Image (cartoon, rainbow, N blue to C red):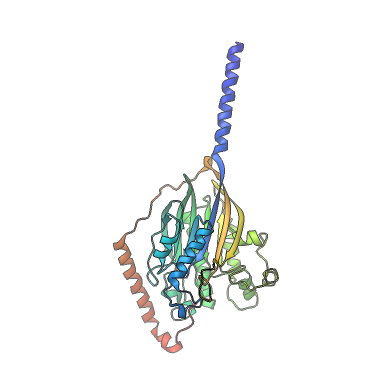
């Protein structure tokens, strides 16, 4: 009897140890480095560029800087005419299929060291500006979303977007509508329990837009729109969390005193990385910064692009016992025929928009393009 009891205790001990070891293995951590970058991929000659950058050479250097940063996921905007160079130079095996060059494509792409699935592109329903105010109606801007397998069987939904550029009344209203459309897309694509990285060129920041609205310069408080749509719904802005102690009410004067420079390229810029925990992935933010990505190889008086990249490094705590994989996982494949007809449709739409607004052009002339 004693022998049987001892054997039973030994068996329970072995099973308990195995279960404990399994539980330990099921919850683990891994680093994740994310960069969101408006790569300025427009085919503009250096002489006409605000940054004086030779675009092809700058794109190669930009890719090397991203590689040096140890990037796991790159979310790109304005990735138009130099996508091939960027793809070849980046140390990443996976990427979304480009939607085409300027005018045809939306300039949005995601590059990753791990597999990408369920790619979806959504055009903005609202935009403003044809021959002025950023000419956003001549560009098929929008949002790209996909699912990245950051570790075997572990999935994070990743978004990159490019919002309207200008700050006139109609463009501000268009941006507000775009942020509402984005919130609805997140609800549809990711639901409430999936881990999400929401990145892009929002063309909106906190300080100047909040203070501009308070001073009566803007007809809508886009800073509050960011807070209401995203922060209030469980998202955190990586730069704010890392550099402003999670306070979203900091002022321009406070930031200027800290950095000794105006906000472009330095603090609270127009680009953001938001993050939201999911059922199986919890993000712990290690660092976040805005980075010019410039290097000694630059031989022109300017930058690699006209936007600073926003970088964030996370430690992901992964709970394999609570993994929430999508119902289906579809790898994107290039379809030249579909791309051709999509390009024809995009060009036709752009031409029709331009022609229908020719009276405005003759009346008002062409405005500045941001």
- The answer to which image quadrant residue 118 occupies is bottom left
Task: Relative to 217, say whether 59 is above or below.
Answer: above
* 234 over 82 or under it: above or below: above
At a point 59% along the width and 24% down the height, the residue shown is: 13
Q: Residue furthest top?
A: 1
Quadrant including the N terminus? top right
The residue nearer to you, when weighing 183 against 330, is 330
Name the residue nearer the viewer: 260 or 21: 260
Q: Position of residue 81 (x, y in %)?
A: 40, 69
> Relative to 81, is 247 on the left or the right?
right
For the point 62% across and 75% down, which residue is it? 212
| Residue at image point 34% right, 58% down | 334
Q: Is residue 41 visible?
A: no
The residue positioned 34% from the left and 73% from the top of the image is 347
Q: Position of residue 38 (x, y in %)?
A: 50, 67
Closer-to-camera residue (187/49): 49
198 horizontally vs 89: left or right = right
User: Where does the image place residue 238, in percent across and percent down from the top left?
Assistant: 60, 59
């Amino acid at each position: 009897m004693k022998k049987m009891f001892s054997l039973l205790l030994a068996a329970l001990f072995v099973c308990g140890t195995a279960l404990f070891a399994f539980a330990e293995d099921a919850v683990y951590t891994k680093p994740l480095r994310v960069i969101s970058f408006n790569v300025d991929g427009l085919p503009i000659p250096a002489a006409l560029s605000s940054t004086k950058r030779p675009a092809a050479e700058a794109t190669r250097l930009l890719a090397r800087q991203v590689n040096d940063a140890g990037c796991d996921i790159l979310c790109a905007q304005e990735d138009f005419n130099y996508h091939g160079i960027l793809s070849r130079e980046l140390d990443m095996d996976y990427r979304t299929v480009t939607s085409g060059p300027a005018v045809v494509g939306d300039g949005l792409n995601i590059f990753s060291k791990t597999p990408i699935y369920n790619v979806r592109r959504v055009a903005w329903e609202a935009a403003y500006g044809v021959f002025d105010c950023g000419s956003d109606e001549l560009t098929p801007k929008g949002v790209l979303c996909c699912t990245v397998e950051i570790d075997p069987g572990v999935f994070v939904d990743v978004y990159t977007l490019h919002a309207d550029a200008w700050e006139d009344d109609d463009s501000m209203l268009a941006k507000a509508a775009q942020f509402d459309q984005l919130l609805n897309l997140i609800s549809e694509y990711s639901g409430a329990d999936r881990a999400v990285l929401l990145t892009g060129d929002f063309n909106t920041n906190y300080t100047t837009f909040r203070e501009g609205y308070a001073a009566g310069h803007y007809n809508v408080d886009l800073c509050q729109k960011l807070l209401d749509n995203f922060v209030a719904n469980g998202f955190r802005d990586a730069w704010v969390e890392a550099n402003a102690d999670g306070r979203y009410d900091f002022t321009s004067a406070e930031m200027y005193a800290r950095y000794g420079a105006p906000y472009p390229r330095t603090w609270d810029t127009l680009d953001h990385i938001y993050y939201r925990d999911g059922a199986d992935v919890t993000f712990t933010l290690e660092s976040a910064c805005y980075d010019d990505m410039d290097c000694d190889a630059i031989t022109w008086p300017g930058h690699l692009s006209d936007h600073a990249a926003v970088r964030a490094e996370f430690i992901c705590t992964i709970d394999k016992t609570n993994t929430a994989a999508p119902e289906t996982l579809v790898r994107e494949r290039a379809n030249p025929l579909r791309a051709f007809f999509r390009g024809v449709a995009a060009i036709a739409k752009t031409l029709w928009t331009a022609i229908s607004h020719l009276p405005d052009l003759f009346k008002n002339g062409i405005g500045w393009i941001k």
